[in-house]
Amino acid sequence: MAQIKNETAYRVALQRIDELLPLVDDTTPTNDKNYIELDMIADLVEEYEMEHYPISTPSLVDTLKLRMYEMGLTQAKLAELLGISAARISEIISCKGEPSLKTGREMCRKLNIDPAIVLGL
């Protein structure tokens, strides 16, 4: 199959996806020409984006800061929620320390953070 080779072709493909989206929905048969074209172009765009616009895994610190923002928590409240001292959460957030296994489990459970992020994978 062909591939998107430059930014201009990428922009054209995105525009075509925008044109096709109103024509395809969950009830569209998989043998419909618009469905097939949308599926093919979406695959090409995905391949191009993975190469030219990769999204890296977020760090634990970035994820903790996001959760604190989303949940309206201060560092002190986060420490209380996780059952650790404010000084300990400060060490983790400033990258001077890593969470213990118990704290990591609590982060996963109480903050809904993926274990791979907690483990740095």
Image (cartoon, rainbow, N blue to C red):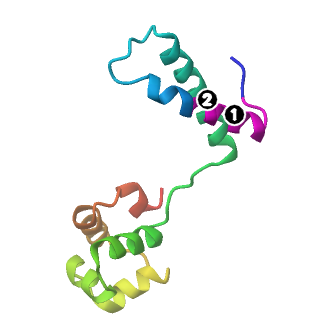
Q: Please tell me which residue is depicted at 48% across the width and 17% down the height of the picture.
A: 35
Q: Please tell me which residue is depicted at 51% across the width and 56% down the height of the picture.
A: 57
Q: Which residue is denoted by mark 2 in the rendering?
A: 16
In this view, 10 is above or below 57: above
Q: Please tell me which residue is depicted at 49% across the width and 61% down the height of the picture.
A: 58
Tag shown at residue 25: none
Which residue reaches farthest bottom? Answer: 87
In this view, 79 is above or below 61: below
Q: Quadrant of residue 89?
A: bottom left
> How many marks can you see?
2
Which residue reaches farthest top? Answer: 31
In which quadrant is the N terminus drawn? top right
Q: Are marks 2 and 1 in contact (CB under 8 Å)?
A: yes
Q: Which residue is denoted by mark 1 in the rendering?
A: 12
Q: Position of residue 40 (x, y in %)?
A: 58, 21
Q: Quadrant of residue 69?
A: bottom left
Secondary structure, mark 1, is: helix
Where are the magenta residues, as a range?
4-17
Q: Quadrant of residue 88?
A: bottom left
Q: Is residue 28 magenta?
A: no
Q: In the rendered view, does 17 fall on the left or right side of 121?
A: right
Q: In the rendered view, does 23 fall on the left or right side of 86?
A: right
Q: Position of residue 50 (x, y in %)?
A: 62, 41
Please tell me which residue lies in front, 82 or 63: 63
Label 1 neighbourhood size at 10 Å, few (<14), some (14-19), many (20+)?
Answer: few
Label 2 neighbourhood size at 10 Å, few (<14), some (14-19), many (20+)?
Answer: some
Q: What kind of residue is marked 2?
A: Arg
Q: Position of residue 17 (x, y in %)?
A: 56, 31
Q: What kind of residue is marked 1?
A: Val
In this view, 104 is above or below 90: above
Q: Is residue 11 magenta?
A: yes
